[in-house]
Image (spheres, helix red, strand yellow):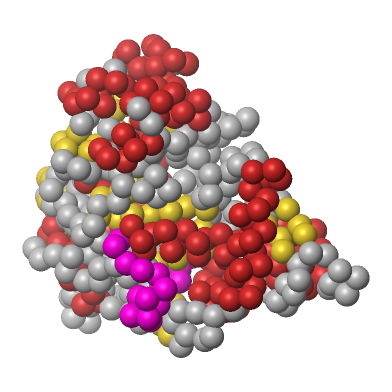
């Protein structure tokens, strides 16, 4: 069997680590090792011990290599893509001082509101960082830590994001990239650097922060001897700066300066997420105006209620998630956990238009429609932020890439297809975050642009392609009308 050159792309998410062994030439996924994480907390708290991530990384790499059947010497590079926004504080030896605050820890919501007001409102923040502070943003968590665990804040010798922590363990270098850094609330997408004024506002010493590499594919160092021993990999292989999980998925799909620009992606998971790589920097308060891993931008919008909320409605009705029909006159907004886009944090679910002949299948279909219209309206906002008219024929003709768990379900795919009126692409690559990280690793090891490399691998274009069908404007307008009229009096907006 001919020898292969492979790289390892790591997806360190909230719940698990996945280490994908990828052929550096063809992009073929040879194996994926998986190891779960532990998340603790209640009443809004969500925390994890960063040491668990490091141990999980070693276990996942070992499992992936074993499954691939390849020797460790075949590996030439590694990169980590991690869950965004989490706050890791380190002591002088590089050990965590306390469990990390995760992106979905909501205890810092009051601090986010206070920070927004202190700088002068949402526009002041988007003008500098591209995003308005919310509970998930790292700056809000740092403010919370200073108020609620001041000893940890005072004792911090390093402040890191989750992927920064793991990259530092690999290479012995404190480094991050513009993409993940843009989710902190102290990195200015307007200047491409940490913002001194925001650091002063936060009481955060810039000496505590990692250096920002030019891109996520920049080689920031080599695998150290201790890390090589822990992971069972050759010392000295390339370690890329890595990036955040959304930025890495974009690379895996071939989105960026050397690939597709202003082409939208819809991720159907617990949350509904829409994003696109663009050369236009977003300042819309409704969006997160992130940087991308390759030097472009990655405007993104997130809705809280997507597959999990619809599955809950199916369970209440005693139906399988695929046992559904169009909603008819019924409108169901499944805002079971409040909503982020639109900003309705105290909202609950709303059902209207119920008739004697409404069937359970129609009620479930109405839940799909309510969730889909919500995230597709966010998509329209995203396209406008990219300088595009979402209703223009040439823009509407651009395929919408559909990823995430919901993209595996017939009901989700057909609902999005019917309500968007857009052609759909369902990429074949199942581990896009890890694949994007592998492209970063391959670029760090051998040179070249990671987006161009991922495009050559073809993960973003292979798979099912569905032609556009006539848009169901009647349902769209019915759902949108209820949402707009009910927002303030009934949904808590």
Quadrant of res 52: top left
Q: Which of 480 and 279 is in front in this view?
A: 480
Above or below, 422 against 216 in this view is below
Q: Is residue 281 above or below residue 97?
A: below
Give the residue at x 50% y 79%. 421
Residue at the image position 16 percent from the left and 41 percent from the top: 191
Residue 94 location, quadrant: top left
Near-viewer residue (17 or 82): 82
Taking the view exactly as shown, the residue that stands out farthest to the left is 447
Front position in the image: 215 or 121: 121
Residue 383 magenta-highlighted = no
Residue 16 at x, y percent in the picture = 46, 50
Q: Where is residue 30 in the image (x, y as percent from the top left)?
A: 33, 72
Q: Determine if the magenta segment contains residue 403.
A: yes
Question: What range of the chain is rendered magenta?
Answer: 386-404
Q: Position of residue 312 (x, y in %)?
A: 71, 57
Residue lying at the far right in this picture: please name it.
356
Instruction: Write the residue at 79% across / 64% down.
Output: 353
**In this image, 18 relative to 487: left or right?**
left
Image vertical order of residue 308 relative to residue 48, above or below: below
Viewer-nearest residue: 160 or 26: 160
**Residue lying at 46% horizontally and 46% vertically, measured from the top left:** 14
**From this viewpoint, is residue 324 visible?**
no
Q: In which quarter of the image is residue 145?
A: top left
Q: Is residue 104 visible?
A: yes
């Amino acid at each position: 069997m001919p020898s292969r050159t492979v790289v390892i792309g790591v997806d360190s998410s909230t719940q698990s680590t996945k280490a994908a062994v990828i052929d550096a030439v063809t992009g073929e996924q040879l194996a994926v090792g998986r190891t779960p994480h532990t998340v603790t907390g209640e009443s809004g708290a969500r925390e994890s011990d960063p040491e668990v991530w490091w141990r999980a990384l070693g276990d996942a790499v070992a499992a992936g290599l074993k499954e691939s059947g390849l020797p460790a010497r075949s590996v030439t590079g590694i990169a980590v893509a991690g869950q965004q926004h989490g706050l890791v504080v380190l002591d002088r030896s590089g050990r965590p001082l306390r469990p990390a605050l995760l992106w979905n820890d909501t205890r810092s919501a009051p601090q986010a509101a206070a920070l927004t007001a202190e700088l002068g409102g949402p526009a002041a923040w988007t003008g500098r960082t591209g995003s308005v502070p919310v509970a998930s943003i790292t700056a809000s968590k740092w403010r919370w830590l200073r108020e609620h665990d001041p000893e940890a804040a005072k004792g911090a010798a390093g402040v890191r994001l989750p992927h920064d922590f793991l990259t530092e363990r690999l290479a012995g270098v404190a480094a991050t990239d513009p993409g993940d850094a843009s989710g902190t609330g102290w990195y200015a997408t307007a200047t491409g650097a940490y913002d001194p004024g925001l650091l002063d506002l936060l009481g955060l010493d810039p000496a505590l922060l990692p250096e920002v590499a030019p891109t996520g594919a920049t080689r920031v160092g080599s695998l150290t001897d201790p890390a090589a021993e822990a992971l069972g990999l050759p010392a000295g292989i390339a370690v890329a700066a890595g990036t955040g999980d959304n930025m890495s998925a974009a690379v895996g799909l071939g989105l960026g300066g050397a690939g597709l620009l202003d082409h939208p992606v819809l991720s159907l998971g617990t949350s509904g997420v829409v994003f696109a790589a663009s050369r236009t920097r977003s300042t819309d308060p409704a969006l997160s105006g992130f940087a991308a891993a390759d030097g472009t931008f990655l405007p993104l919008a997130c809705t809280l209620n997507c597959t999990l909320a619809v599955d809950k409605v199916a369970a209440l009705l005693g139906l399988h998630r695929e046992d559904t029909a169009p909603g008819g006159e019924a409108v169901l907004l499944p805002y079971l956990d409040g909503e982020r886009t639109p900003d309705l944090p105290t909202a609950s679910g709303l059902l209207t238009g119920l008739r004697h002949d409404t069937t359970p299948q129609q009620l479930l279909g109405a839940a799909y429609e309510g969730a889909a219209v919500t995230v597709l309206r966010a998509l329209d906002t995203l396209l406008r932020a990219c300088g595009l008219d979402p209703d223009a024929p040439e823009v509407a003709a651009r395929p919408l890439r559909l990823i995430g768990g919901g993209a595996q379900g017939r009901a989700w795919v057909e609902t999005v297809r019917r309500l968007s009126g857009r052609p759909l692409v369902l990429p074949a690559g199942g581990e896009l975050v890890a694949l994007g990280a592998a492209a970063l690793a391959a670029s760090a090891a051998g040179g070249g642009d990671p987006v161009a490399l991922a495009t050559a691998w073809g993960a973003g274009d292979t798979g099912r392609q569905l032609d556009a069908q006539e848009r169901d404007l009647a349902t769209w307008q019915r759902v949108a009308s209820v949402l707009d009229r009910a927002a303030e009096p009934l949904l808590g907006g």
